[in-house]
């Protein structure tokens, strides 16, 4: 049962680290200080009133994605390896990561369209390699979900022989 133990530990590690990140993000977002330590929240999005809200939405989307990952790890820790529950949670995790990556790409464009053109009447669309890699990796996760479905089918066929 090494896989179940690893999944249980990984699930706890994900939530402990994510909880710490959320606390630091909230402290920085609200402009609070932690004694002598000052946390500053910045975003790479274009400056404006909507930039902080877009960052907040991205944090919420990542939290939903991590919740789906946690569901998958909980099922694995319970002994399910190729069940529909594991595959469904994994597919939901990939979907929320894809939504997160697309929102992070499109939100600055939408925010600049809503704000209107700047002094030079230009709209800026920045696409970073990191954005493309994130979309590509999430699409690969969908392929892995298909592979898991195939593994579940093979597992069911093998159980019929036994």
Image (cartoon, rainbow, N blue to C red):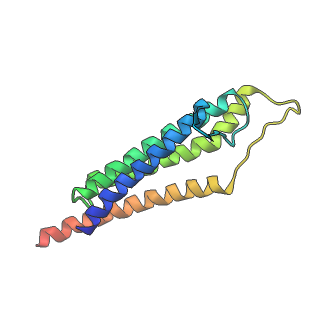
Q: Outermost residue toward the left?
A: 162
Q: Is residue 130 above or below residue 155?
A: above
Rendering quarter of residue 130: bottom right
Residue 110 visible? The answer is yes
Q: Residue at x 49, y 41 (%)?
A: 22
* Nearer to the camera, 98 or 27: 27
Q: Position of residue 40 (x, y in %)?
A: 65, 39
Q: Position of residue 101 (x, y in %)?
A: 57, 47
- The image shows a total of numbered marks equal to 0
Question: From the viewer's perspective, is 149 left or right of 40?
Answer: left
Q: Is residue 158 above or below residue 108?
A: below
Residue 96 visible? The answer is no
Q: Residue at x 70, y 50 (%)?
A: 127
Q: Residue at x 46, y 47 (%)?
A: 18
Q: Position of residue 26 (x, y in %)?
A: 54, 35
Q: Residue at x 41, y 49 (%)?
A: 16
Instruction: Please state, as top left, top right, bottom left or bottom right, where the N terminus lies in the image.
Output: bottom left
Question: From the viewer's perspective, is 101 left or right of 76?
Answer: right
Q: Is residue 160 above or below residue 133?
A: below
């Amino acid at each position: 049962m090494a896989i179940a133990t690893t999944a249980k530990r990984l699930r706890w590690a994900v939530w402990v680290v994510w909880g710490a990140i959320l606390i630091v993000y909230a402290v920085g977002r609200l402009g609070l200080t932690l004694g002598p330590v000052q946390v500053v929240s910045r975003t790479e999005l274009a400056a404006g009133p909507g930039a902080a809200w877009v960052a907040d939405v991205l944090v919420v989307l990542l939290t939903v994605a991590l919740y789906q990952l946690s569901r998958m790890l909980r099922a694995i820790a319970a002994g399910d390896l190729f069940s529909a529950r594991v595959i469904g949670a994994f597919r939901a995790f990939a979907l929320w990561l894809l939504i997160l990556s697309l929102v992070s790409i499109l939100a600055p464009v939408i925010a600049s369209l809503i704000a209107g053109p700047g002094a030079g009447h230009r709209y800026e669309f920045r696409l970073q390699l990191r954005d493309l890699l994130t979309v590509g990796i999430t699409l690969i996760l969908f392929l892995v979900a298909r592979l898991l479905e195939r593994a579940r089918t093979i597992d069911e066929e093998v159980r019929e022989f036994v």
